[in-house]
Amino acid sequence: MSEAVATEQSQKGILGWVERTGNKLPDPVFLFFYLIIALVVISVICAMAGVSAFHPTELDEATGGKLKIEAISLLAADNIQRLWVEMPKTFTHFHPLGYVLVVMLGAGVAERSGFFAAGMAKAVKSAPKALLTPVVALVAMIGNHAADAGYVVLIPLAGILFAAAGRHPLAGIAAAFAGVSGGFSANISPGQLDALLFGITEEAVAASSLDPAWTANIAGNWYFIAAMTFLFLPIIWYVTDKVIEPRLGAWTGGASAGADDEGLSPDPTEHTGELAAKGLRHAGLAALFVVALWVAMVFAPGTPLINEAACDGIPAADCSIHSELRPLYQSLVGAFFLLFLLTGWAYGRATGVIKDHRDLVNMMAESMKDMGYYLVLAFAAAHFVAMFNWSNLGLISAVHGAAGIQSTGLPLPLVLGLMVIFAGLLNLFVGSASAKWALLAPILVPMLMLLGISPEGATAAYRVGDSATNIITPLMVYFPLILVFAQRWKADFGLGSLTAMMLPYSIWLLISGTTLIVVWFYLGIPLGPDAPVAYALPGGGG
């Protein structure tokens, strides 16, 4: 298919409008810059108009009533001084920054050593023919921890495996794409995405001052994302085998039509056979070592990851085991860093990719180079969030927004469902998960807290909507790459073809994810360890 034809197809219909509109938006970094300018103007107007709200939990020492929160101009002398004097602190104290950089130091080694790619390739190549679709989908969702490797390794590999099994390779690409990107937030364990999103959530809670004692727990959505994994798995399986593959028709092109004569084979797995098997065995032993180490730190004498004094002086009814386990939850960032680092190092040593400590350090350094754009984005987002806090507009908006929702009489689960849909629609225009959450969290998190929904519940609802529509927006950074993979098997496969193929997945993932979060709230199931979906303000405020 020619570039001109692809361009013409991409301009048609609603999806063409989405693409054109999204392309007109500035880069997320400059989007935050423009939002800061708008925030300054709005803060001046609100301060002059006397916009205010009463703090739900804090009391005015003079009157004994609720503390009145007034909008503050960002052009006030104190705020101008704070902007320039505290600029380094504003950036470095941005909660997601440390979480993400620590985890990625280890994940970079696991990715560059080839461990992530070899592990995914081994998993799907070992799948029985009858279970090829669910295995590909499950490995794809678990492969979210591998970041880029999930896209550049597993998706083209799935096409090859389907063709080798006599099935349509585009169905394999669709199943893998739906798992990696449509199931972006689904997984059997927390990872770097949890560290990123909960860092932003913690920043939003801290800025609102609604609950100073609340701290991020990257396992706060663990139960929910695990449930999403096993909910999405049969959906992707069914849509692939019963909807997409019949529509594609029988495959007659053979098992090698997708090979690239320019050395760009869709299977980029470098290590095969006994060498890869040896590396995976060593990586498995390294993983067992990390698990054993954390178990020892929980149960060994001294229990460094258990706060045995957490409930001292507190009535038993007001304290739970989760208070004692909080250091364990907070250590999970370090645990994932060490897990990825040691498994990647063990695999690299066994396969010869890592010859000495200098190779290991270089891989960690390279992973930080890849985080360059994120650092720039974090700088802009940190200042937007901080200035929102300085102006008091975030809390004021949350209080009035919560009151407005309460006046409508909408059930809280329905509010969560509407938030999922809103995040999914916004995802069509702004692809970055961190940029969207940094933009939405300062208002949505405290507003939902005031309505009785926990920060973990707000985060869970957001990530459902954020992932479901990834696979139908051309603005998703890997969308053109998936199109290239598909065109290796079917040359005239265009942008509209890819979008139409993925649309059934997107619809069903959005419906099922929204239903899951609504039912989850109705049943009151914890979203993770020490992470209820319902929430009550400290001291009974509200």
Image: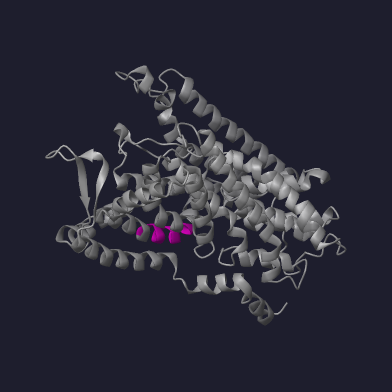
Position of 480 with respect to 366 (left or right) is right
Position of 458 with respect to 316 (left or right) is right
Residue 326, x across and y down, in percent: 41, 30
Residue 70, x across and y down, in percent: 21, 53
Q: Is residue 410 visible?
A: yes
Residue sitting nearer the eye, 280 or 181: 181
- Which residue appears at 58% of the width and 35% of the height? 286
| Residue 452 part of the magenta segment | no
- Which residue appears at 43% of the width and 45% of the height? 198
Position of 7 with respect to 44 (left or right) is right
Q: Against 299, is 230 above or below?
A: below
- Which residue appears at 26% of the width and 65% of the height? 40
Residue 181, x across and y down, in percent: 61, 54
- Which residue appears at 70% of the width and 47% of the height? 235
Which quadrant does the N terminus fall into?
A: bottom right
| Residue 377 part of the magenta segment | yes
Q: Against 165, is 337 above or below?
A: above
Could you tell me what secondary structure mostly forms the magenta stretch? helix
- View extreme (bottom): residue: 4
Residue 118, x across and y down, in percent: 67, 47
Residue sitting nearer the eye, 512 or 292: 512
**Residues shaded magenta:** 369-379
